Image (tube, rainbow, N blue to C red):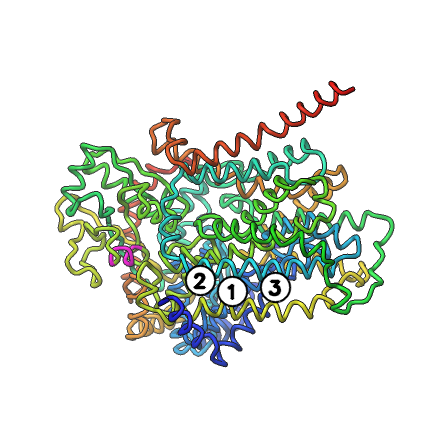
């Protein structure tokens, strides 16, 4: 059956080949989201969809194919026709690390199976501590965590939040207990409710609680300071640790997609991300709209991959 | 009194003709997807999300919320008529609802569940209006030991809730616990019992499992029966479907208790309407003087879970709106929808966006009234479903289940899971094993385990952490009582009988 599908795809690619690419797109384009509706990645896809629709002149369909840490969506796009009509709305885990953590390293390799188009958004995290802990700087936190046993909330083993915590824990040499929850919501509930004391959280979900005074921000994990929290230093600026930790979203096509299709999508994507309305929407999400050329996006992917692969390997329970 | 003032302002938002129309559309669609087995609120909400881009944010939320609670009204219809829950939350309603329909009292059952749902919704909305912020804060103080104790109590109390042999019920619950273990371990990220399928790393899909066990299983076992159940010959006028005075009286207190339980469980993040309904059902059976009537068409057994599941979906808005922490997948989606509209839910929402908050809350009331007016006249139409010949009805049900199960994750694997559980459900009904406890064990088991291990992880292995708060002590003692008391009572009555005779 697979052969049948493939041969049909080859046929379709051979016959009207160049003609198809020239008038791309002439059919709806699907963005495949590796998570259920409602999260960060899904929201990002839905934010850019109207702008892409306008610029490409074709309907954009957002399709959620959640499950298996994003592998189901990734494999679906990998096996789709490489014609630019099926795109992967990727994020860190699903694109870079899922084959490793899911113990199926041969499933796909982002370097050979996908063609990067551009990043969509960058979401920094904030390291916050509950207000009643009476800690106001990162140094104080490290100090306090060495003398007393402190609990850190994580939204799940292997998440960027967890990895950042592990990396920092190793650098400062403190005995933090990392408590895992099922997602951001229960993790933040434990932080606000008093079960845990501090955590790394995506800006979008923790910002209301910072404003409310329930938690104190000690640092942000991006390379530059965040507009919403201008007085909060970056991790690097604190001098305690030297790394950045962000989650990205971005678009990729199956490898082998014609260059001009990629160029057209890239152009439409970057124009969409440059509009004030879209910028504002990402800002509301606690993210930053991040237009990049395919080459720049590839560099970002390489950087994130190199920084975090060893960490992911170290915490992977399914080796 | 400022609450009343705010609420009045909310009604000004909710009673504009646009808002009324949108609310009506939402609850109508919700009822519809609720009635169809397999297709749930989440699928309908995600389909409607793009529509909300063209609306005011508050109107968009009124639409999405209307679908959510509208589905709770609809989901009991197929439980009662076909023994197939429209959504997993209405599974508990099958246990007594379908026997009522078999006795020719389907109309009365639908009447009672509609009124109970309405009552449950109203109680939860009143609690939401009066106590939302403090309740949300109190729910936050629940840590791992409290969750463990509450969920354990639910599991123990509900373990014998199904009709028939308690041993078979218990065995099926354990089976449910085992199914609940499939997936990724929260504490380590390790995979358990995934049999090499990446699709199973997120666990068995709840909708696929529930629709397989109840839906496909029920269709198969009905097909295996020789004779076709006779369609009800009675008339379908509203008057003929009014519950008797006796039925009405005995459903009042269960609805009250169900509403309160549902409101509380709904306000706890991480729970949901299915848990609320099962615990309410189990509570009624426990405190009933005639528990043997449960499973044969007791009105208490439908009034309580339906009041509870509708109360819990209304109360689920408490943590979402007041602290920005969604209780379940549907709420997470609602939160996402708000964010897309530029509204960031959190502790400041009520003061920063009073129009939106109170408008939405007022629309809940409007929506519940609309649902009541919409559902009661439709009962006659729904009951007629029973007279559809089964060679037409069953393929349609199977088709709808497959579409519904697929719509959750757009994954064909889930349909295979549903079919597999359909065969399991068929085998179980052949040997008279109850289906509901499997679902219950599956839902509650992982919560019990996760919080048990988290408690010990946080306390460094110190078991005294389990009895560190009044809530957890109370629940643990009640669990113990629920476990030990029935056998003791039985022993005593046997001794008394022996002494007498």
- Residue B33 numbered mark, or none: 3
Q: Chain of mark 3?
A: B
The local secondary structure at tag 2 comes to helix
In which quadrant of the rendered view does residue A113 lie?
Answer: bottom left
Mark 3–mark 2 Cα distance, whole angstroms, equals 17 Å
- Identified at 70% across, 40% down, the residue is B290
- Image x and y of residue B100, in percent: 74, 52
Q: Identify the residue position indicated by label 2 in the image.
A: B334
User: Cβ–Cβ below 8 Å for labels 1 and 2?
Assistant: yes
The residue lying furthest to the bottom in this view is B17
Q: Residue A169 falls in which quadrant of the image?
A: top left
Quarter of the image where the N terminus of chain B is located:
bottom left
Query: Is A101 placed left or right of A195 in the picture?
Result: right
Give the CA distance from mark 1 to mark 2.
9 Å
Badge 1: residue crowd in 10 Å (few <14, some 14–19, many ≥20): many
Q: Which residue is mark 1?
A: B45
The chain letter under disc 2 is: B
Local crowd size for mark 3, using a 10 Å CA cut-off: few (<14), some (14–19), many (≥20): many
Q: Quadrant of the C terminus of chain B?
A: top right
Above-or-below relation of B205 to B493: below
Residue B297 percent location from the top left of the image: 73, 49
Q: CA distance from mark 3 to mark 1?
A: 10 Å
Answer with mark 1 or mark 2, whichever residue precedes in sequence: 1
Q: Is residue B425 on the magenta stretch?
A: no
Mark sitting earlier along the chain (3/2): 3
Residue A259 seen in render: no
Q: Give the percent coordinates (x, y) of residue B48.
A: 51, 69
**Disc 1 is attached to a residue of which chain?**
B
Residue B396 in the figure: left or right of residue A122: right
Q: Which residues are magenta?
A: A206-211
Q: For mark 2, does the 10 Å Cα neighbourhood hold few (<14), some (14 to 19), or many (20 or more) residues?
A: many
Q: Secondary structure at mark 3?
A: helix
């Amino acid at each position: 059956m697979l052969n049948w599908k493939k041969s049909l795809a080859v046929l379709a690619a051979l016959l009207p080949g160049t003609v198809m690419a020239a008038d791309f797109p002439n059919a709806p384009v699907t963005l495949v989201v590796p998570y259920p509706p409602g999260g960060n990645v899904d929201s990002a896809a839905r934010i850019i969809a109207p702008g892409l629709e306008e610029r490409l002149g074709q309907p954009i369909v957002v399709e959620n194919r959640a499950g298996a840490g994003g592998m189901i969506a990734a494999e679906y796009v990998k096996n789709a026709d490489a014609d630019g009509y099926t795109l992967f709305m990727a994020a860190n885990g699903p694109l870079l690390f899922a084959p490793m953590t899911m113990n199926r390293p041969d499933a796909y390799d982002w370097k050979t199976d996908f063609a990067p188009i551009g990043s969509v958004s960058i979401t920094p995290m904030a390291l916050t501590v509950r207000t009643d802990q009476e800690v106001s700087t990162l140094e104080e936190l490290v100090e306090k965590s060495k003398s007393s046993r402190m609990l850190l909330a994580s939204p799940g083993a292997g998440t960027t939040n967890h990895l950042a915590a592990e990396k920092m824990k190793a650098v400062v040499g403190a005995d933090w207990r990392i408590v895992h929850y099922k997602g951001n919501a229960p993790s933040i509930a434990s932080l606000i409710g008093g079960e845990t004391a501090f955590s790394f959280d995506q800006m979008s979900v923790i910002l209301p609680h910072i404003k409310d005074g329930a938690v104190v921000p000690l640092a942000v994990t991006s390379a530059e300071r965040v507009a919403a929290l201008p007085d909060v230093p970056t991790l690097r600026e604190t001098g305690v640790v030297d790394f950045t930790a962000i989650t990205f979203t971005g678009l990729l096509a199956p490898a082998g997609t014609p260059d001009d299709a990629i160029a057209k999508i890239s152009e439409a994507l970057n124009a969409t991300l440059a509009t004030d309305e879209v910028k504002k929407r990402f800002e509301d999400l606690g993210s930053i709209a991040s237009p990049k050329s395919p080459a720049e996006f590839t560099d970002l992917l390489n950087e994130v991959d190199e920084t975090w692969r060893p960490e992911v390997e170290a915490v992977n329970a399914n080796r | 009194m400022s609450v009343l003032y705010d609420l009045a302002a909310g009604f000004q938002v909710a009673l504009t003709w646009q808002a009324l129309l949108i609310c009506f559309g939402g609850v109508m669609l919700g009822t519809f997807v609720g009635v169809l087995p397999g297709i749930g609120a989440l699928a309908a909400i995600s389909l409607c999300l793009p529509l909300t881009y063209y609306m005011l944010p508050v109107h968009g939320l009124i639409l999405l919320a209307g679908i959510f609670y509208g589905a709770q009204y609809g989901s009991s219809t197929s439980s009662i008529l076909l023994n197939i829950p429209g959504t997993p939350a209405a599974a508990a309603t099958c246990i007594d609802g379908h026997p009522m329909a078999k006795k020719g009292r389907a109309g009365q059952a639908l009447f009672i569940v509609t009124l109970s749902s309405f009552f449950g919704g109203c109680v939860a909305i009143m609690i939401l209006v009066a106590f939302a912020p403090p309740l949300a804060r109190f729910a936050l103080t629940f840590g791992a030991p409290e969750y463990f104790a509450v969920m354990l109590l639910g599991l123990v109390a509900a373990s014998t809730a199904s009709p028939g042999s308690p041993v078979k019920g218990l065995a099926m619950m354990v089976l449910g616990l085992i199914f609940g273990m499939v997936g990724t371990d929260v504490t380590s990220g390790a995979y358990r019992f995934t049999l090499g399928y990446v699709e199973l790393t997120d666990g068995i899909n709840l909708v696929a499992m529930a629709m397989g066990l109840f839906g496909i299983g029920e269709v198969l076992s009905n097909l295996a029966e020789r004779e076709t159940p006779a369609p009800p010959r009675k008339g379908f006028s509203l008057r003929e479907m009014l519950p008797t005075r006796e039925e009405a009286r005995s459903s009042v207190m269960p609805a009250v208790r169900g509403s309160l339980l549902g409101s509380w469980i709904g306000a706890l993040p991480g729970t949901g309407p299915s848990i609320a309904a099962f615990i309410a059902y189990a509570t009624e059976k426990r405190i009933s003087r005639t528990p043997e009537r449960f499973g044969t068409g007791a009105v208490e057994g439908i009034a309580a879970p339906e009041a509870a599941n509708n109360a819990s979906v209304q109360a689920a808005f408490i943590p979402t709106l007041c602290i920005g922490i969604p209780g379940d997948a549907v709420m997470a989606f609602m939160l996402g929808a708000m964010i897309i509209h530029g509204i960031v839910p959190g502790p400041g929402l009520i003061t920063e966006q009073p129009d939106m908050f109170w408008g939405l809350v007022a629309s809940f009331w409007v929506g519940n009234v609309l649902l009541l007016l919409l559902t009661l006249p439709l009962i006659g139409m729904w009951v007629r479903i029973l007279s559809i010949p089964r060679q037409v009805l069953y393929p349609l049900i199977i088709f709808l289940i497959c579409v519904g199960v697929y719509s959750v994750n757009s994954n064909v694997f889930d349909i295979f899971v549903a079919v597999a559980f359909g065969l399991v459900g068929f085998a179980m009904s052949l040997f008279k094993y109850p289906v509901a406890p499997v679902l219950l064990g599956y839902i509650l088991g992982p919560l019990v385990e996760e919080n048990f291990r988290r408690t010990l992880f946080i306390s460094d292995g110190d078991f005294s952490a389990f009895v560190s708060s009044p809530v957890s002590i109370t629940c643990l003692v009640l669990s113990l009582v629920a476990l030990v008391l029935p056998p003791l009572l039985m022993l005593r009555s046997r001794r008394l009988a022996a002494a007498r005779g």
